[in-house]
Image: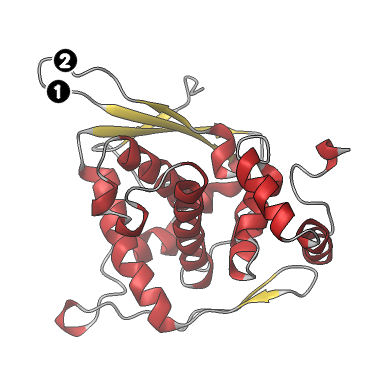
Amino acid sequence: MVGDGGRRLGAQARVGWSGAAAVALLGASLVGCGGQTQLPPPRPLVVRSGVRVFTTQERMREVDEWLRAEVKNIEDDPSFMIETSVSDEVAFPWEDLEIRIPEEVEGERQDTARVSISAGGVDARWPIMIYAHLHLMSRSDRLEEWLPEAVGKTGFELERAILARTSDAWLYVRAILDAGPYEPMDELLYSTEHGYLDALILTARGDEFSEEREAWLAREPDALEEFREWYQDTFSKDPPGLKSEG
C-alpha cells in the first residue's frame, strides 16, 4: 500500500532519476538531425560472476521508440494514475503491484496502479512503472496501443509478454542510460536474455501458474535443476521460490 510518502503519477508524473539518465530518456539530448534518435553504443552488462549481457544499437533504437511514447503516456494521460512509494524491501515488479479499476462515475473514471520501489532501486522506477502501466492497459482493454502482440493473452502468457517488455526497458536503462545495478531487475533481465524467463516465472510464481508449471516440468523434467544451476552460477543464490518447495 502507498503511505503518506507515496507519489501520484500519471498526468502529474515526475521523473525519478537524477542527472543524465532523466535528460537522456525524456529530453532532446539523444535526438539528432531530422529528429531521429541517435543512441550511444550500448555498453555490455556484467554481474559479479562474470556472466554478461550484450545488445545492439538497432535493438535499443526499437526500445527507445516505444519507451519514450510509453513514458509520455504515463506522464500525460489523465485517465489513470500510477502511485509509487519508497520501500525498504527489494522486490520483483510483480511482488507489490496493486491495480484498482473503479466503477465509472458520471462518464469518468481514473484507473490506478500502486507500486513500491526500493530506495536502492530508483533507477528502475520507469521500467517498474511500465510493468504497472501495461497491466493497467490490459485491464482497461487498451493493450493494443502498447503491446499489440499480447492482445487476447491472459494469465501466464500475458505475464510473460509484459515481463519481457519490462526487461527490455531495464536493458535500455542499464545499457544506454548507464543506470546502476538493481538485483531483482538484473535477475529478470539476465533470465530473459539467457532464455530462462519462463523458468523464472514458473519457479518464483509456481502457485499462481500451477498448470503451466506442471506442464513445463512434465515436458522438460530436467529444466528446474538446469535453471537452479544457472541461477546459482550467475547470482550465487537459489532462484526465488525454490526454497519453499522443500
Q: Relative to residue 205, is residue 8 drawn left or right?
A: left
Give above or below for 147 relative to 178.
Answer: above
Does dot 1 land on a helix, a strand or a loop? loop
The quadrant where residue 187 appears: bottom right
- Name the spot of residue 150 as percent of width and height, x first: 37, 54
142 relative to 174 in the view: left or right: left
Q: Residue at x 19, y 19 (%)?
A: 104
Under mark 2, the amino acid is Val
**Residue at the left extreme of this rendering:** 106
C-alpha distance separating marks 2 and 1? 5 Å
Q: Nearer the viewer, residue 17 or 217?
A: 217
Report the quarter where the C terminus lies.
top right
Are the two marked residues, 2 and 1, in contact with CB atoms closer than 8 angstroms? yes
Residue holding disc 1: 108
Find numbered disc 2 in the image and state the secondary structure of the residue it sits on. loop
Q: Is residue 115 above or below residue 54?
A: above
Is residue 180 shown to the viewer in this render?
A: yes
Say which residue label 2 marks: 105
Any part of residue 181 in sight: no
Residue 151 screen position, x and y as percent: 32, 51
In the picture, measured across the screen, residue 158 lies left or right of residue 34, that is right
Pick the residue in front: 168 or 222.
222
Query: Which amino acid type is shown beneath numbered disc 1?
Result: Glu
Instruction: State the count of labels.
Output: 2
Above or below, 186 against 80 in this view is: below
> Where residue 126 sits in the image (x, y, percent)?
43, 50
Name the residue at 45% across, 51% down. Answer: 162
Residue farthest right in this picture: 246
- Residue 234 appears at what percent x and percent y? 78, 66
